[in-house]
Image (spheres, helix red, strand yellow):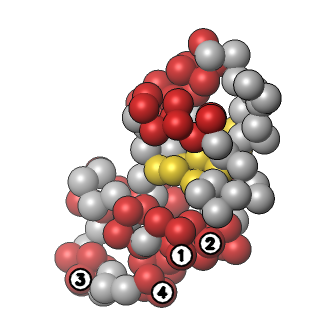
Amino acid sequence: MTTPSITLYGIPNCDTVKKARAWLTEAQIAVQFHDFKKQGVPADLLAQWVVQLGWEALLNRKGTTWRKLDPTVQAGVHDAASAQALMLAHPSVIKRPVVVWHPNSSHAVTVGFDVPTFTQALRG
């Protein structure tokens, strides 16, 4: 199996990100890590992820960041544009990790950590 060019986007102290990184390390898969807190959310990539996955899949409505938002702000998220604006302003509201597996593939992006999904993505 050839090692694809993989970038994992997230926050280093997120438990799910830690699990995903540990699994990839154990599988001896080289990964580039993009820290949303330090490096921000790439707006152009976020737009692509929304097209590929849907904004609902990317928006973490169960997390602490979402729960701490004012109910008016929460109610204002009703479509892709409003969700993207919120995710750019509050990167912690994005479900993690977002993984870009094969930059030139149409099925290049996953969100969250799931061993079968990661295994399938590595196979291309």
Position of the C terminus, as image quadrant, is: top right
The Cα–Cα distance between marks 2 and 1, rounded to whole angstroms, is 5 Å
Q: 97 or 123: which is nearer to us? A: 123
| Residue 23 vertical position relative to residue 71 in the rendered view, above or below | above
Front in this rendered view, residue 46 or 115 = 115
**Cα–Cα span, label 4 and label 1:** 11 Å
Q: Amino acid at mark 4?
A: Ala
Task: State the mark number for residue 81.
Answer: 4
Check disc 4 and report its element: helix, strand or loop. Answer: helix
Q: In 3D space, how far apart are the residues under numbered discs 4 and 2 (Cα atoms)? A: 12 Å
Instruction: Write down the residue under mark 3.
Output: 75
Q: Please, what secondary structure does the residue beneath circle 2 have?
A: helix
> Which of pointers 4 and 3 lies earlier in the amino acid sequence?
3
* Position of 90 relative to 113 (above/below): below
Q: Which residue is mark 1?
A: 51
Residue at label 2?
48
Frontmost of labels 2 and 3 is 2
Which residue is painted at 53% across and 69% down in the image? 52
The picture places residue 103, in percent across and down from the top left corner, at 75, 55
**Residue 112 visible, this angle:** yes
How many other residues sit within 10 Å of disc 3, few (<14), some (14-19) or many (≥20)?
few
Q: Earlier in the sequence, mark 2 or mark 3?
A: 2
- Image side of residue 110 versus residue 76, left or right: right
Residue at point 51%, 60% (across, down): 91
Which residue in the rendered view is the most extreme toward the left? 71
10 Å crowding of disc 1: few (<14), some (14-19), many (20+): few
What amino acid does circle 2 point to? Gln
Say whether disc 4 or disc 1 marks the residue closer to the N-terminus. Answer: 1
Give 36 or 123, whichever is nearer the viewer.
Answer: 123
